[in-house]
Image (tube, rainbow, N blue to C red):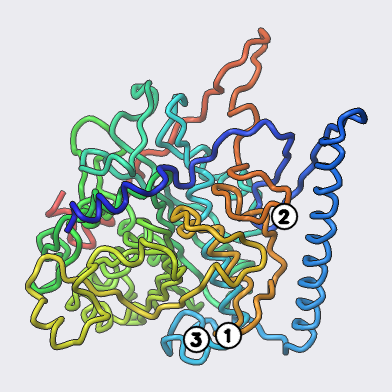
Protein backbone atom coordinates (compact mmCIF):
# COMPACT_ATOMS: atom_id res chain seq x y z
CA UNK A 1 0.00 0.00 0.00
CA UNK A 2 2.77 2.44 0.96
CA UNK A 3 4.59 1.67 -2.31
CA UNK A 4 1.49 2.38 -4.39
CA UNK A 5 0.86 5.65 -2.55
CA UNK A 6 4.50 6.62 -2.91
CA UNK A 7 4.30 6.12 -6.68
CA UNK A 8 1.11 8.15 -6.78
CA UNK A 9 2.63 11.03 -4.80
CA UNK A 10 5.71 11.02 -7.02
CA UNK A 11 3.60 12.93 -9.53
CA UNK A 12 2.96 15.71 -7.00
CA UNK A 13 4.87 18.99 -7.01
CA UNK A 14 7.58 18.94 -4.37
CA UNK A 15 6.94 22.19 -2.54
CA UNK A 16 4.40 22.79 0.19
CA UNK A 17 4.25 26.13 2.02
CA UNK A 18 7.86 26.82 1.03
CA UNK A 19 8.01 30.44 -0.12
CA UNK A 20 9.89 30.99 -3.36
CA UNK A 21 11.71 34.28 -3.54
CA UNK A 22 10.41 37.02 -5.80
CA UNK A 23 11.90 40.37 -6.70
CA UNK A 24 8.55 42.13 -6.91
CA UNK A 25 8.49 45.23 -4.64
CA UNK A 26 5.92 43.79 -2.25
CA UNK A 27 5.50 45.10 1.29
CA UNK A 28 3.30 43.23 3.69
CA UNK A 29 2.06 42.93 7.22
CA UNK A 30 2.14 39.39 8.57
CA UNK A 31 -1.20 39.94 10.26
CA UNK A 32 -3.83 37.56 8.94
CA UNK A 33 -6.31 40.41 8.92
CA UNK A 34 -4.52 43.07 6.92
CA UNK A 35 -2.52 43.06 3.73
CA UNK A 36 -0.79 46.01 2.10
CA UNK A 37 0.84 46.04 -1.31
CA UNK A 38 2.64 48.51 -3.50
CA UNK A 39 3.87 47.70 -6.97
CA UNK A 40 5.84 49.47 -9.65
CA UNK A 41 4.87 48.80 -13.23
CA UNK A 42 7.45 49.79 -15.83
CA UNK A 43 6.23 50.68 -19.32
CA UNK A 44 8.03 51.78 -22.45
CA UNK A 45 6.14 54.14 -24.73
CA UNK A 46 7.90 52.80 -27.80
CA UNK A 47 6.99 49.21 -27.13
CA UNK A 48 3.48 48.36 -28.15
CA UNK A 49 3.61 44.98 -26.42
CA UNK A 50 4.28 46.60 -23.07
CA UNK A 51 1.33 48.98 -23.57
CA UNK A 52 -0.91 46.05 -24.32
CA UNK A 53 0.20 44.33 -21.13
CA UNK A 54 -0.62 47.44 -19.10
CA UNK A 55 -4.06 47.74 -20.74
CA UNK A 56 -4.70 44.06 -20.06
CA UNK A 57 -3.69 44.46 -16.42
CA UNK A 58 -5.92 47.51 -16.09
CA UNK A 59 -8.92 45.64 -17.42
CA UNK A 60 -8.20 42.76 -15.07
CA UNK A 61 -7.93 45.22 -12.18
CA UNK A 62 -11.31 46.75 -13.03
CA UNK A 63 -12.84 43.27 -13.20
CA UNK A 64 -11.35 42.37 -9.84
CA UNK A 65 -12.46 45.67 -8.27
CA UNK A 66 -16.05 45.15 -9.41
CA UNK A 67 -16.02 41.57 -8.15
CA UNK A 68 -14.55 42.63 -4.80
CA UNK A 69 -17.01 45.52 -4.38
CA UNK A 70 -19.91 43.18 -5.08
CA UNK A 71 -18.60 40.82 -2.40
CA UNK A 72 -18.26 43.69 0.06
CA UNK A 73 -21.83 44.88 -0.56
CA UNK A 74 -23.15 41.36 -0.09
CA UNK A 75 -21.18 41.14 3.14
CA UNK A 76 -22.70 44.41 4.40
CA UNK A 77 -26.23 43.28 3.54
CA UNK A 78 -25.62 39.95 5.25
CA UNK A 79 -24.25 41.57 8.42
CA UNK A 80 -27.23 43.97 8.64
CA UNK A 81 -29.67 41.06 8.50
CA UNK A 82 -28.00 39.06 11.27
CA UNK A 83 -28.83 39.45 14.97
CA UNK A 84 -25.86 40.30 17.19
CA UNK A 85 -24.63 37.42 19.30
CA UNK A 86 -21.68 36.91 21.60
CA UNK A 87 -19.28 34.01 21.91
CA UNK A 88 -19.47 34.18 25.71
CA UNK A 89 -23.15 33.17 25.55
CA UNK A 90 -22.70 30.12 23.34
CA UNK A 91 -19.07 29.01 23.53
CA UNK A 92 -19.97 25.49 24.65
CA UNK A 93 -22.07 24.90 21.54
CA UNK A 94 -19.32 26.43 19.39
CA UNK A 95 -16.91 23.96 21.04
CA UNK A 96 -19.09 21.02 20.14
CA UNK A 97 -21.26 20.27 23.18
CA UNK A 98 -24.00 19.20 20.72
CA UNK A 99 -21.57 17.95 18.04
CA UNK A 100 -22.24 21.14 16.04
CA UNK A 101 -25.77 20.04 15.18
CA UNK A 102 -27.47 22.81 13.19
CA UNK A 103 -24.34 24.98 13.09
CA UNK A 104 -22.75 23.77 9.84
CA UNK A 105 -25.57 24.04 7.31
CA UNK A 106 -26.31 26.88 7.24
CA UNK A 107 -22.98 27.97 8.66
CA UNK A 108 -23.18 29.63 12.05
CA UNK A 109 -21.38 32.97 11.95
CA UNK A 110 -19.83 32.64 15.40
CA UNK A 111 -18.55 29.17 14.59
CA UNK A 112 -17.04 30.40 11.34
CA UNK A 113 -15.33 33.25 13.13
CA UNK A 114 -13.93 30.95 15.81
CA UNK A 115 -12.71 28.41 13.26
CA UNK A 116 -10.84 31.10 11.38
CA UNK A 117 -9.40 32.45 14.62
CA UNK A 118 -8.05 29.07 15.69
CA UNK A 119 -6.95 28.37 12.11
CA UNK A 120 -4.88 31.54 12.20
CA UNK A 121 -3.27 30.35 15.42
CA UNK A 122 -2.35 27.17 13.59
CA UNK A 123 -1.08 29.18 10.61
CA UNK A 124 1.14 31.17 12.97
CA UNK A 125 3.17 27.99 13.48
CA UNK A 126 4.12 28.09 9.80
CA UNK A 127 4.73 31.83 9.73
CA UNK A 128 7.04 31.71 12.74
CA UNK A 129 9.03 28.61 11.80
CA UNK A 130 12.61 29.02 10.54
CA UNK A 131 12.88 26.56 7.65
CA UNK A 132 15.87 28.19 5.92
CA UNK A 133 18.82 25.73 5.83
CA UNK A 134 21.20 28.71 5.53
CA UNK A 135 19.95 30.06 8.85
CA UNK A 136 21.99 29.42 11.97
CA UNK A 137 18.70 28.75 13.74
CA UNK A 138 17.01 26.53 11.14
CA UNK A 139 14.38 24.34 12.80
CA UNK A 140 13.60 26.83 15.54
CA UNK A 141 10.97 29.51 16.07
CA UNK A 142 12.03 32.88 14.69
CA UNK A 143 10.55 34.85 17.60
CA UNK A 144 10.76 34.84 21.37
CA UNK A 145 7.69 33.74 23.32
CA UNK A 146 7.04 37.22 24.68
CA UNK A 147 7.01 38.74 21.21
CA UNK A 148 5.44 35.85 19.31
CA UNK A 149 2.04 37.28 18.37
CA UNK A 150 3.36 40.83 18.14
CA UNK A 151 6.02 39.87 15.59
CA UNK A 152 3.35 38.13 13.51
CA UNK A 153 1.12 41.20 13.46
CA UNK A 154 -1.40 39.51 15.78
CA UNK A 155 -1.07 41.92 18.73
CA UNK A 156 -4.80 41.84 19.47
CA UNK A 157 -5.16 38.06 19.58
CA UNK A 158 -5.59 38.22 23.37
CA UNK A 159 -3.38 35.24 24.26
CA UNK A 160 -0.03 34.82 25.97
CA UNK A 161 2.32 32.09 24.76
CA UNK A 162 3.40 30.27 27.91
CA UNK A 163 5.50 27.48 26.45
CA UNK A 164 7.19 26.41 23.23
CA UNK A 165 7.02 22.75 22.20
CA UNK A 166 9.90 20.79 20.65
CA UNK A 167 10.22 17.36 19.08
CA UNK A 168 13.23 15.18 18.42
CA UNK A 169 14.28 14.60 14.83
CA UNK A 170 15.73 11.16 15.55
CA UNK A 171 12.83 9.37 13.88
CA UNK A 172 12.15 8.55 10.24
CA UNK A 173 10.49 11.81 9.19
CA UNK A 174 12.90 13.54 6.78
CA UNK A 175 10.17 15.67 5.23
CA UNK A 176 9.02 17.11 8.55
CA UNK A 177 12.24 18.12 10.28
CA UNK A 178 14.57 20.88 9.11
CA UNK A 179 18.23 21.02 10.10
CA UNK A 180 20.73 23.86 10.08
CA UNK A 181 24.15 23.58 8.50
CA UNK A 182 25.48 24.93 11.80
CA UNK A 183 23.76 22.62 14.33
CA UNK A 184 25.94 23.72 17.25
CA UNK A 185 24.33 27.15 17.31
CA UNK A 186 21.07 26.03 18.85
CA UNK A 187 20.32 22.29 18.34
CA UNK A 188 21.35 19.37 16.17
CA UNK A 189 18.34 17.16 16.82
CA UNK A 190 15.36 19.32 17.82
CA UNK A 191 12.65 21.13 15.88
CA UNK A 192 10.19 23.67 17.19
CA UNK A 193 6.78 22.06 16.80
CA UNK A 194 4.26 24.46 18.30
CA UNK A 195 3.21 26.25 21.47
CA UNK A 196 0.83 26.43 24.40
CA UNK A 197 -0.99 29.71 25.04
CA UNK A 198 -3.66 30.99 27.41
CA UNK A 199 -6.16 33.80 27.04
CA UNK A 200 -5.54 36.96 29.05
CA UNK A 201 -8.11 38.48 31.40
CA UNK A 202 -9.68 40.74 28.80
CA UNK A 203 -9.94 37.99 26.18
CA UNK A 204 -11.25 35.52 28.75
CA UNK A 205 -14.06 37.91 29.62
CA UNK A 206 -14.94 38.20 25.93
CA UNK A 207 -14.83 34.42 25.43
CA UNK A 208 -16.77 33.61 28.58
CA UNK A 209 -14.01 31.34 29.92
CA UNK A 210 -10.25 30.97 30.32
CA UNK A 211 -9.06 29.27 27.13
CA UNK A 212 -5.91 27.13 27.01
CA UNK A 213 -4.73 26.60 23.43
CA UNK A 214 -2.29 24.01 22.11
CA UNK A 215 -1.21 24.74 18.53
CA UNK A 216 0.78 22.15 16.57
CA UNK A 217 2.94 22.80 13.51
CA UNK A 218 2.44 20.70 10.41
CA UNK A 219 4.73 20.03 7.48
CA UNK A 220 6.19 23.05 5.72
CA UNK A 221 7.76 21.76 2.52
CA UNK A 222 6.44 18.56 1.00
CA UNK A 223 3.57 16.11 0.80
CA UNK A 224 5.81 13.03 0.85
CA UNK A 225 5.41 12.81 4.63
CA UNK A 226 2.27 10.82 3.85
CA UNK A 227 4.41 7.94 2.61
CA UNK A 228 6.91 8.47 5.43
CA UNK A 229 4.16 7.77 7.96
CA UNK A 230 2.21 5.15 6.02
CA UNK A 231 3.60 2.47 8.29
CA UNK A 232 1.20 0.53 10.49
CA UNK A 233 -1.20 0.82 13.39
CA UNK A 234 -0.03 -0.07 16.86
CA UNK A 235 -1.76 -0.08 20.28
CA UNK A 236 -1.59 3.36 21.82
CA UNK A 237 -0.77 1.65 25.13
CA UNK A 238 2.61 0.66 23.67
CA UNK A 239 3.44 4.36 23.62
CA UNK A 240 2.85 4.36 27.40
CA UNK A 241 -0.35 6.37 27.04
CA UNK A 242 -2.47 4.71 29.69
CA UNK A 243 -5.33 3.33 27.64
CA UNK A 244 -6.54 -0.01 29.06
CA UNK A 245 -7.93 -1.24 25.71
CA UNK A 246 -5.16 -2.83 23.62
CA UNK A 247 -7.46 -2.72 20.61
CA UNK A 248 -7.21 1.08 20.47
CA UNK A 249 -4.54 1.67 17.83
CA UNK A 250 -2.96 4.70 16.18
CA UNK A 251 -0.59 5.27 13.28
CA UNK A 252 2.87 4.45 14.59
CA UNK A 253 4.64 7.45 13.01
CA UNK A 254 2.24 9.93 14.61
CA UNK A 255 2.56 8.50 18.09
CA UNK A 256 6.36 8.15 17.78
CA UNK A 257 6.64 11.83 16.91
CA UNK A 258 4.44 12.63 19.91
CA UNK A 259 6.29 10.47 22.46
CA UNK A 260 9.93 10.13 21.37
CA UNK A 261 12.73 11.97 23.19
CA UNK A 262 16.49 12.10 23.53
CA UNK A 263 17.56 12.00 27.15
CA UNK A 264 21.23 12.76 26.46
CA UNK A 265 22.72 15.47 24.29
CA UNK A 266 20.19 18.08 23.17
CA UNK A 267 18.44 19.81 26.07
CA UNK A 268 15.36 20.54 24.00
CA UNK A 269 14.74 16.81 23.48
CA UNK A 270 15.11 15.70 27.12
CA UNK A 271 11.32 15.57 27.31
CA UNK A 272 8.98 14.33 24.61
CA UNK A 273 6.46 16.62 22.97
CA UNK A 274 3.85 14.71 24.93
CA UNK A 275 5.53 15.39 28.27
CA UNK A 276 6.00 19.06 27.43
CA UNK A 277 2.38 19.71 26.53
CA UNK A 278 0.97 17.62 29.38
CA UNK A 279 3.13 19.37 31.98
CA UNK A 280 2.18 22.83 30.71
CA UNK A 281 -1.55 22.10 30.52
CA UNK A 282 -1.31 20.68 34.05
CA UNK A 283 0.40 23.87 35.25
CA UNK A 284 -2.20 26.12 33.63
CA UNK A 285 -5.21 24.16 34.88
CA UNK A 286 -3.76 24.33 38.39
CA UNK A 287 -3.16 28.06 38.04
CA UNK A 288 -6.63 28.94 36.79
CA UNK A 289 -8.71 25.94 37.93
CA UNK A 290 -9.34 27.23 41.41
CA UNK A 291 -11.21 30.29 40.22
CA UNK A 292 -14.93 30.40 39.59
CA UNK A 293 -14.43 31.22 35.92
CA UNK A 294 -15.10 28.64 33.23
CA UNK A 295 -12.22 27.01 31.39
CA UNK A 296 -11.68 25.24 28.06
CA UNK A 297 -8.85 23.36 26.38
CA UNK A 298 -8.71 23.96 22.63
CA UNK A 299 -6.23 22.12 20.41
CA UNK A 300 -5.56 23.05 16.81
CA UNK A 301 -3.30 21.98 13.99
CA UNK A 302 -3.04 21.67 10.23
CA UNK A 303 -1.90 18.68 8.18
CA UNK A 304 0.39 16.52 10.29
CA UNK A 305 -0.18 19.02 13.12
CA UNK A 306 -3.85 18.04 13.18
CA UNK A 307 -2.88 14.42 13.84
CA UNK A 308 -0.83 15.60 16.82
CA UNK A 309 -3.81 17.70 17.92
CA UNK A 310 -6.11 14.66 17.93
CA UNK A 311 -3.51 12.56 19.77
CA UNK A 312 -2.93 15.18 22.45
CA UNK A 313 -6.68 15.69 22.89
CA UNK A 314 -7.08 11.95 23.43
CA UNK A 315 -4.14 11.93 25.85
CA UNK A 316 -5.38 14.87 27.93
CA UNK A 317 -8.80 13.28 28.39
CA UNK A 318 -7.49 9.73 28.91
CA UNK A 319 -5.05 10.93 31.57
CA UNK A 320 -7.80 12.94 33.27
CA UNK A 321 -5.81 16.14 32.92
CA UNK A 322 -9.01 18.02 32.16
CA UNK A 323 -10.60 17.01 35.46
CA UNK A 324 -9.99 19.66 38.09
CA UNK A 325 -9.48 19.06 41.79
CA UNK A 326 -13.08 20.01 42.59
CA UNK A 327 -14.34 17.41 40.10
CA UNK A 328 -15.19 19.95 37.43
CA UNK A 329 -14.58 18.69 33.88
CA UNK A 330 -12.90 21.06 31.45
CA UNK A 331 -14.21 20.62 27.86
CA UNK A 332 -11.59 19.46 25.37
CA UNK A 333 -12.11 20.43 21.73
CA UNK A 334 -9.95 19.82 18.65
CA UNK A 335 -10.24 22.04 15.58
CA UNK A 336 -8.48 20.06 12.86
CA UNK A 337 -7.56 21.48 9.47
CA UNK A 338 -6.74 19.21 6.51
CA UNK A 339 -5.88 16.35 8.83
CA UNK A 340 -5.18 12.69 7.99
CA UNK A 341 -6.74 9.70 9.71
CA UNK A 342 -5.04 8.99 13.02
CA UNK A 343 -6.24 5.64 14.34
CA UNK A 344 -8.59 2.71 13.92
CA UNK A 345 -12.32 2.41 14.61
CA UNK A 346 -11.71 1.54 18.28
CA UNK A 347 -9.66 4.72 18.65
CA UNK A 348 -12.56 6.71 17.21
CA UNK A 349 -15.05 5.11 19.61
CA UNK A 350 -12.84 5.56 22.66
CA UNK A 351 -12.21 9.21 21.81
CA UNK A 352 -15.98 9.69 21.66
CA UNK A 353 -16.40 7.97 25.03
CA UNK A 354 -13.81 10.32 26.53
CA UNK A 355 -15.95 13.27 25.46
CA UNK A 356 -13.31 14.90 23.24
CA UNK A 357 -15.01 16.93 20.52
CA UNK A 358 -13.34 17.07 17.10
CA UNK A 359 -14.38 19.23 14.16
CA UNK A 360 -12.39 18.49 11.01
CA UNK A 361 -12.34 21.11 8.26
CA UNK A 362 -11.26 19.71 4.91
CA UNK A 363 -11.08 20.63 1.24
CA UNK A 364 -12.74 17.80 -0.71
CA UNK A 365 -9.96 17.99 -3.31
CA UNK A 366 -7.19 17.53 -0.74
CA UNK A 367 -5.44 14.14 -0.79
CA UNK A 368 -4.17 14.26 2.83
CA UNK A 369 -7.54 13.73 4.64
CA UNK A 370 -7.99 10.62 2.48
CA UNK A 371 -4.91 9.00 4.00
CA UNK A 372 -3.93 6.66 5.49
CA UNK A 373 -6.51 3.94 4.97
CA UNK A 374 -7.35 4.16 1.28
CA UNK A 375 -9.11 0.79 1.27
CA UNK A 376 -10.34 0.20 4.82
CA UNK A 377 -11.85 3.30 6.40
CA UNK A 378 -15.06 4.77 7.83
CA UNK A 379 -16.73 4.93 4.40
CA UNK A 380 -17.14 1.15 4.05
CA UNK A 381 -19.95 -0.80 5.79
CA UNK A 382 -19.49 -1.26 9.52
CA UNK A 383 -19.60 -5.05 9.23
CA UNK A 384 -16.65 -4.92 6.86
CA UNK A 385 -14.83 -2.51 9.17
CA UNK A 386 -15.31 -4.88 12.11
CA UNK A 387 -13.89 -7.70 10.01
CA UNK A 388 -10.92 -5.51 8.97
CA UNK A 389 -10.31 -4.14 12.47
CA UNK A 390 -7.37 -6.45 13.01
CA UNK A 391 -5.57 -5.35 9.87
CA UNK A 392 -2.69 -2.86 10.26
CA UNK A 393 -4.17 -0.58 7.56
CA UNK A 394 -7.74 -0.16 8.86
CA UNK A 395 -8.31 3.51 9.76
CA UNK A 396 -11.27 5.66 10.72
CA UNK A 397 -11.73 9.42 10.86
CA UNK A 398 -12.92 10.88 14.15
CA UNK A 399 -15.42 13.58 15.03
CA UNK A 400 -17.51 15.73 12.70
CA UNK A 401 -16.41 16.73 9.22
CA UNK A 402 -17.00 20.07 7.48
CA UNK A 403 -16.39 19.67 3.76
CA UNK A 404 -15.43 22.67 1.64
CA UNK A 405 -14.82 22.93 -2.10
CA UNK A 406 -12.26 25.35 -3.51
CA UNK A 407 -13.96 25.24 -6.93
CA UNK A 408 -16.86 27.36 -5.65
CA UNK A 409 -14.66 30.35 -4.79
CA UNK A 410 -14.65 33.01 -7.53
CA UNK A 411 -11.25 34.17 -6.25
CA UNK A 412 -9.37 30.94 -6.92
CA UNK A 413 -8.23 29.59 -10.24
CA UNK A 414 -8.92 26.03 -11.24
CA UNK A 415 -5.92 23.82 -10.62
CA UNK A 416 -5.11 20.20 -9.96
CA UNK A 417 -2.09 21.15 -7.87
CA UNK A 418 -2.40 19.12 -4.62
CA UNK A 419 -0.24 21.68 -2.81
CA UNK A 420 -2.90 24.36 -3.35
CA UNK A 421 -5.71 22.03 -2.27
CA UNK A 422 -3.83 21.36 0.98
CA UNK A 423 -2.90 24.96 1.78
CA UNK A 424 -4.18 26.27 5.14
CA UNK A 425 -4.62 29.90 4.09
CA UNK A 426 -6.74 28.72 1.18
CA UNK A 427 -8.85 26.64 3.57
CA UNK A 428 -9.43 29.66 5.82
CA UNK A 429 -10.45 31.63 2.74
CA UNK A 430 -13.02 28.92 1.92
CA UNK A 431 -14.31 29.06 5.49
CA UNK A 432 -14.84 32.79 5.20
CA UNK A 433 -16.98 32.37 2.09
CA UNK A 434 -18.92 29.26 3.10
CA UNK A 435 -22.55 29.68 4.20
CA UNK A 436 -23.95 26.21 3.68
CA UNK A 437 -24.31 23.53 1.05
CA UNK A 438 -25.35 25.04 -2.26
CA UNK A 439 -25.08 28.58 -0.91
CA UNK A 440 -23.35 31.38 -2.76
CA UNK A 441 -19.72 32.04 -1.89
CA UNK A 442 -19.61 35.41 -0.08
CA UNK A 443 -16.77 36.50 2.19
CA UNK A 444 -18.32 36.92 5.63
CA UNK A 445 -15.53 38.91 7.26
CA UNK A 446 -13.84 40.34 4.20
CA UNK A 447 -10.68 38.40 5.05
CA UNK A 448 -8.06 39.43 2.51
CA UNK A 449 -7.90 36.91 -0.37
CA UNK A 450 -4.26 37.90 -0.93
CA UNK A 451 -3.35 35.80 2.10
CA UNK A 452 -4.07 32.69 0.02
CA UNK A 453 -0.93 33.26 -2.04
CA UNK A 454 1.41 33.52 0.93
CA UNK A 455 2.68 30.02 0.29
CA UNK A 456 1.14 28.85 -2.99
CA UNK A 457 -0.10 29.96 -6.43
CA UNK A 458 -3.87 29.76 -6.15
CA UNK A 459 -5.38 33.21 -6.73
CA UNK A 460 -6.61 34.25 -10.16
CA UNK A 461 -4.07 36.26 -12.11
CA UNK A 462 -6.08 39.48 -12.11
CA UNK A 463 -5.42 39.79 -8.40
CA UNK A 464 -1.88 40.86 -9.28
CA UNK A 465 -0.67 39.09 -6.15
CA UNK A 466 2.53 37.11 -6.79
CA UNK A 467 2.56 33.48 -5.71
CA UNK A 468 4.54 32.44 -2.62
CA UNK A 469 5.00 36.09 -1.72
CA UNK A 470 5.70 35.80 1.98
CA UNK A 471 9.36 36.25 2.92
CA UNK A 472 11.49 38.04 5.47
CA UNK A 473 12.88 41.41 4.48
CA UNK A 474 16.32 40.83 2.93
CA UNK A 475 15.88 37.14 3.84
CA UNK A 476 16.59 38.03 7.46
CA UNK A 477 19.97 39.65 6.80
CA UNK A 478 20.81 42.97 8.51
CA UNK A 479 23.72 45.40 8.41
CA UNK A 480 26.00 45.55 11.43
CA UNK A 481 27.93 48.58 12.66
CA UNK A 482 30.70 47.86 10.16
CA UNK A 483 28.25 47.94 7.27
CA UNK A 484 28.45 44.19 6.66
CA UNK A 485 25.38 42.08 6.00
CA UNK A 486 25.03 39.39 8.66
CA UNK A 487 22.49 37.07 10.26
CA UNK A 488 21.47 38.67 13.56
CA UNK A 489 21.89 36.71 16.77
CA UNK A 490 18.79 35.78 18.69
CA UNK A 491 18.06 35.72 22.37
CA UNK A 492 18.66 32.45 24.15
CA UNK A 493 15.90 29.98 23.38
CA UNK A 494 13.67 28.64 26.11
CA UNK A 495 14.62 25.16 27.20
CA UNK A 496 12.37 23.43 29.73
CA UNK A 497 11.06 25.08 32.93
CA UNK A 498 12.30 23.83 36.27
CA UNK A 499 8.84 22.74 37.42
CA UNK A 500 8.29 20.27 34.56
CA UNK A 501 9.40 17.34 36.75
CA UNK A 502 6.93 18.42 39.44
CA UNK A 503 3.95 18.42 37.07
CA UNK A 504 4.97 15.18 35.35
CA UNK A 505 5.28 13.51 38.75
CA UNK A 506 1.78 14.67 39.64
CA UNK A 507 0.54 13.09 36.42
CA UNK A 508 2.39 9.86 37.11
CA UNK A 509 4.49 10.30 33.96
CA UNK A 510 7.82 10.35 35.78
CA UNK A 511 7.87 6.56 35.61
CA UNK A 512 8.29 6.80 31.86
CA UNK A 513 11.11 9.37 31.87
In depth, the one of 241 and 180 nearer the eye is: 180
The reply to whether residue 433 is in sight is yes
In depth, the one of 198 and 123 nearer the eye is: 123
Residue at image position (51%, 30%) is: 491
Labels 2 and 3: the sequence-earlier one: 2
Q: Is 430 displayed left or right of 12 in the figure?
A: right
Mark 2 → mark 1, Cα distance in angstroms: 29 Å
Mark 3 → mark 1, Cα distance in angstroms: 24 Å
The answer to whether mark 2 and mark 1 are in CB contact below 8 A is no
Q: Which mark is residue 438?
A: 1
Alpha-carbon neighbours of circle 2 within 10 Å: few (<14), some, or many (≥20)?
few
Residue at image position (47%, 79%) is: 95
The reply to whether residue 122 is in sight is no
Alpha-carbon neighbours of circle 3 within 10 Å: few (<14), some, or many (≥20)?
some
Considering the numbered disc 1 on the image, is that residue within a helix, a strand or a loop? loop
Q: Tell me the quarter of the image containing the N terminus.
A: bottom left
Q: Is 293 displayed left or right of 472 in the figure?
A: left
Report how many numbered discs are placed on residues in the image: 3
Residue at image position (25%, 79%) is: 378
Residue on which disc 2 sits: 34
Considering the numbered disc 2 on the image, is that residue within a helix, a strand or a loop? loop
Amino acid sequence: MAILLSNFLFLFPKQLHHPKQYSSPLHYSTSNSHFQTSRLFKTTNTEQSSQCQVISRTRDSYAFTEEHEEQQQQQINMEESLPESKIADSWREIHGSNDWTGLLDPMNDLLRSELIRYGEMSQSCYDAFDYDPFSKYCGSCRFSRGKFFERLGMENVGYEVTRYLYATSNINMPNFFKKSRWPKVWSKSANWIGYVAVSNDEKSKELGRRDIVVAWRGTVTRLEWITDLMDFLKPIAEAKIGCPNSGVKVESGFVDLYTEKEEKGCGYCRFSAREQVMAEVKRLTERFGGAEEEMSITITGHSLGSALAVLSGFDIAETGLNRLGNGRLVPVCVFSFSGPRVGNFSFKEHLHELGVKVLRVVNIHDIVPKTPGFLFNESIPRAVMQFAEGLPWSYSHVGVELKLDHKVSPFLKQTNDPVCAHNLEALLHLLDGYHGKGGRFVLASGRDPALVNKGCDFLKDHYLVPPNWRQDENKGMIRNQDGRWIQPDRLKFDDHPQDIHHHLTQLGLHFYS
